[in-house]
Amino acid sequence: MKEKDKKETWKEKRRRKLNEFEEKHPKLYDFLVKAAAVTVVVGPIAAAYFVGYSDGSKISPKAIQENFDKTSEELDQLHQEWLQKQREAYEKNFNQGAYANNSAEFKIFAENFNLQPGESYFIWDDNQFKGEGLPVDMMIDHQVYGIGDPEYKEIDYNPWEMD
């Protein structure tokens, strides 16, 4: 007999151990089988509900309907409240000198810098995104009329048209 035939395969060994466990603990085995079946069937449904359809979720049908039912005045008010929070954070930091120093230094730099028509620069570093957990390397983006790539070519088709 070959060596391969003598060895018990992984599936056979697992099946044998499972049968032994079922014989020794029939009630526990039945419970575990039922629990696994419920988890496989109900788990994804419950996860989908708690992620997107519970009333506490911003993407639940109830939350979407509430936003849909709001008038433009209510949406305007919510936007103004959000803007006010942003202004408060800006003013708090600016008045404490966090923004004022950078602003003064950048104004001195900008006075000696001659931008061409349509030219702009954007500066990013990881300090802008502190608390958001986003890894961002320092980056300086040079654009002319909103185009950053000098090899930019207009596309010759409408991407919104259906095939």
Image: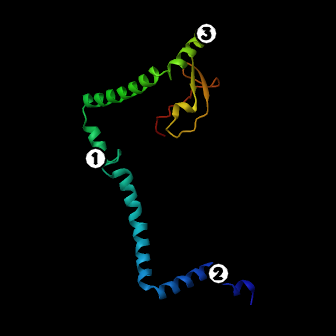
Rounded to the nearest angstrom, the CA distance separating label 1 from label 3 is: 53 Å
| Left or right side of 33 for 66 | left
- The residue shown at (57%, 80%) is 14
Mark 1 vs 3, N-terminal side: 1
- Residue at mark 3: 114
Q: Choose between 9 and 152: the one closer to the eye.
A: 9
Q: Residue at x 35, y 45 (%)?
A: 59
Residue tagged 1: 62
Residue 63 x/y as whole percent: 30, 44
Residue 125 location, quadrant: top right
For label 1, count other residues whose C-alpha is less than 10 Å away and answer few (under 14), some (14-19) or many (20+). some
- Whether tag 2 and tag 3 are in contact, CB under 8 A, the answer is no
Q: Residue at x 56, y 83 (%)?
A: 17
Q: CA distance from mark 2 to mark 3?
A: 76 Å
Amino acid type for the residue under numbered disc 1: Lys
Q: Position of residue 43 (x, y in %)?
A: 41, 63
Where 73 sits versus 117, above or below?
Answer: below
Q: Which residue is mark 2?
A: 9
Q: Earlier in the sequence, mark 2 or mark 3?
A: 2
Location of residue 4 in the rendering, given as x and y in whole percent from the top left corner: 72, 83
Here the colouring is rainbow
Q: Locate the N terminus and report the quarter of the image it occupies.
A: bottom right
Q: Are marks 1 and 2 in contact (CB under 8 Å)?
A: no
Question: Tags 1 and 3 in contact by the CB under 8 Å rule?
Answer: no
Task: Single out the mark in the foreground, 2 or 3.
Answer: 3
